[in-house]
């Protein structure tokens, strides 16, 4: 009677362990660029790519590992970093060259779980091909591999050794929560079940290290609020996707739960600090507004006029934020692109369904702006671009396909509601058709046939334990 069931200890078997050494052999080449090229790629990654990618590790963490020849620096992780960085250097090797090397190296790093392999797989999820359409299936598979290895390492538990340094603990916390976010993100975008639940995680959220500079602390602060928002999103999808299946028979119980979730999202938004820095802060707020709008759309027993004004306000906030994101930089990471494209279409649909679209000029302006955002994000979807152009300018015609490319120039004029040729009734009639067509086109644009060309005159030198250059590497201030 006094014995404790072994089921109460279930899960304690998994313990954190030190990072193992590199594989003893590789099935494919591990050639790397010359030292100067690698140094430049690393610098570009942390200045151009890292701010827009989830911070599994900080710049300081990586350079400390590089200086000490730590186990975090592996050929697989380096190739994924270089793939992202090469996209920002016109004269560098093609990013897909490094990405394809990473793909071939993945199998060599599956026999023993490593934190560095989890991070590398997460970077492979967010890599956007220049020369081929992004594969959501491949990204989802890589994310699943990262989550499985994360669970294999026991990073979701707090069973770490007292001998572990604060660096080791924080690195694993950040990696775990990055897995959680990416698992939710990729699963939600494809409407597939996720693998990691918030209730499975016994770790607290990441926190700054003493050596983190103000910029890294700001990035981490935004990351923490994104983690909290994803926990809320899990509750939303748990209710609508896995709760009572007869949601088409809407009742007050469903309404009450939706209002409760909506209040939680509002509380999250109200607690966002003003210190959050772009560009990550804009994406975080954009996701928050989109989740809030989606819940408002579900409410059926609230004051109709108040709900209309609330939908209009949220859609306008989304449209404004997308304008800022596009002004600052075209979304580079494929998941950021997908989110921005989806929210632009969602805003367009909301504006299009506004009863005042045919008479209220501000609603017409918001609708036109949101369609222009979709048009800019999905330039390669030519049929979508022509449809949006016809909606923005009902008098637009383009019968000559040979000259259709001129439609997609960034300087192409778009008729505004203040123009003399603007027809509100024509816009209202075409609005839903255009927005509905847009919803099916969200996704990464196709960039043409796949090519993998490795320059013949490219020389390589592997960063290895015997390479002394990293010992004298100066951490950039």
Image (cartoon, grey):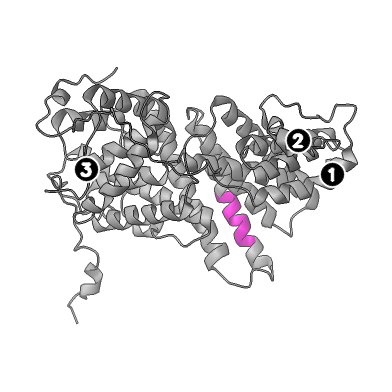
Is residue 447 shown above or below 470? below
**Quadrant that contains the N terminus:** bottom left
Please report whichever mark, 1 or 3, sits nearer to the chain's N-terminal start. 3
Q: For numbered disc 3, what is the local secondary structure?
A: loop
Please report the residue visible at 44 percent of the width from the left and 60 percent of the height from the top: 194
Q: Is residue 257 magenta?
A: yes
Q: Can residue 354 be seen in the rendering of this structure?
A: no
Labelled pair 2, 1 in contact (Cβ < 8 Å): no
**Quadrant that contains the C terminus:** top left
| Residue, disc 2 | 368
Question: Mark 2: few, some, or many residues within 10 Å (few <14, many ≥20)?
Answer: many
Q: For numbered disc 2, what is the local secondary structure?
A: helix
Is residue 351 shown above or below 208? below
Please report whichever mark, 2 or 3, sits nearer to the chain's N-terminal start. 3
| Residue, disc 1 | 428
Please report the residue visible at 69 percent of the width from the left and 44 percent of the height from the top: 384
**Region in magenta:** 256-264
Give the spatial CA distance, label 2 vs label 3. Answer: 51 Å
Is residue 418 shown above or below 301? above
Question: Mark 1: few, some, or many residues within 10 Å (few <14, many ≥20)?
Answer: many
Give the spatial CA distance, label 1 vs label 3. Answer: 58 Å
Q: Residue furthest top?
A: 477
Labelled pair 1, 3 in contact (Cβ < 8 Å): no
Give the spatial CA distance, label 2 vs label 1. Answer: 11 Å
Q: For numbered disc 1, what is the local secondary structure?
A: helix
Labelled disc at residue 362: none
| Residue, disc 3 | 29
Out of 54 and 330, give the one closest to the viewer.
330
Residue 231, percent from left and from top: 46, 52
């Amino acid at each position: 009677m006094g014995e404790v069931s072994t089921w109460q200890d279930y899960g304690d078997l998994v313990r954190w362990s030190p990072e193992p050494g590199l594989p003893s052999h590789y099935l494919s080449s591990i050639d790397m660029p010359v030292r100067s090229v690698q140094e430049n790629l690393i610098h570009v990654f942390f200045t151009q790519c890292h701010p827009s990618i989830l911070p599994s590790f900080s710049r300081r963490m990586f350079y400390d590992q590089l200086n000490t020849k730590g186990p975090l620096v592996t050929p697989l992780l380096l190739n994924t970093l270089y793939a992202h960085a090469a996209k920002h250097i016109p004269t560098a090797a093609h990013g897909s060259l490094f990405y394809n090397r990473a793909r071939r190296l993945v199998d060599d790093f599956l026999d023993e779980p490593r934190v560095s392999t989890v991070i590398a797989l997460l970077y492979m999820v967010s890599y956007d091909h220049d020369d081929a359409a992004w594969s959501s299936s491949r990204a989802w598979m890589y994310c699943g591999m990262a989550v499985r290895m994360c669970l294999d390492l026991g990073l979701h538990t707090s069973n770490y050794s007292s001998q572990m340094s604060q660096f080791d603990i924080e690195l694993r916390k950040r990696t775990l929560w990055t897995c959680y976010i990416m698992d939710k993100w990729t699963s939600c975008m494809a409407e597939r079940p996720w693998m990691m639940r918030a209730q499975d995680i016994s770790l607290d959220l990441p926190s700054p290290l003493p050596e983190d500079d103000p910029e890294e602390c700001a990035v981490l602060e935004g990351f923490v609020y994104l983690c909290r928002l994803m926990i809320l999103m899990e509750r939303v999808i748990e209710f609508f996707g896995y709760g009572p299946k007869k949601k088409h028979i809407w009742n007050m119980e469903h309404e009450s739960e939706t209002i409760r979730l909506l209040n939680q999202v509002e509380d999250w938004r109200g607690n966002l600090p003003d210190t959050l820095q772009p560009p990550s802060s804009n994406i975080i707020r954009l996701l928050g507004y989109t989740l809030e709008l989606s819940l408002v759309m579900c409410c059926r027993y609230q004051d109709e006029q108040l709900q209309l004004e609330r939908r209009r306000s949220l859609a306008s906030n989304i449209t404004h934020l997308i304008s800022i994101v596009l002004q600052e930089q075209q979304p580079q990471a494929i998941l950021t692109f997908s989110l921005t494209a989806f929210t632009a279409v969602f805003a367009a649909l909301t504006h299009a369904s506004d009863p005042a679209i045919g008479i209220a000029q501000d609603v017409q302006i918001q609708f036109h702006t949101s369609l222009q955002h979709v048009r800019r994000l999905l330039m390669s979807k030519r049929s979508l671009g022509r449809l949006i152009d016809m909606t923005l300018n009902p008098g637009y015609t383009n019968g000559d396909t040979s000259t259709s490319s001129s439609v997609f120039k960034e300087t192409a004029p778009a008729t505004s509601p203040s123009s003399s040729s603007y027809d509100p009734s024509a816009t209202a009639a075409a609005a839903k058709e255009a927005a509905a067509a847009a919803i099916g086109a969200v996704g990464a644009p196709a960039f043409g046939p796949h090519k993998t060309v490795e320059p013949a005159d490219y020389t390589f030198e592997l960063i290895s334990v015997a390479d002394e250059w990293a010992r004298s590497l100066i951490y950039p201030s």
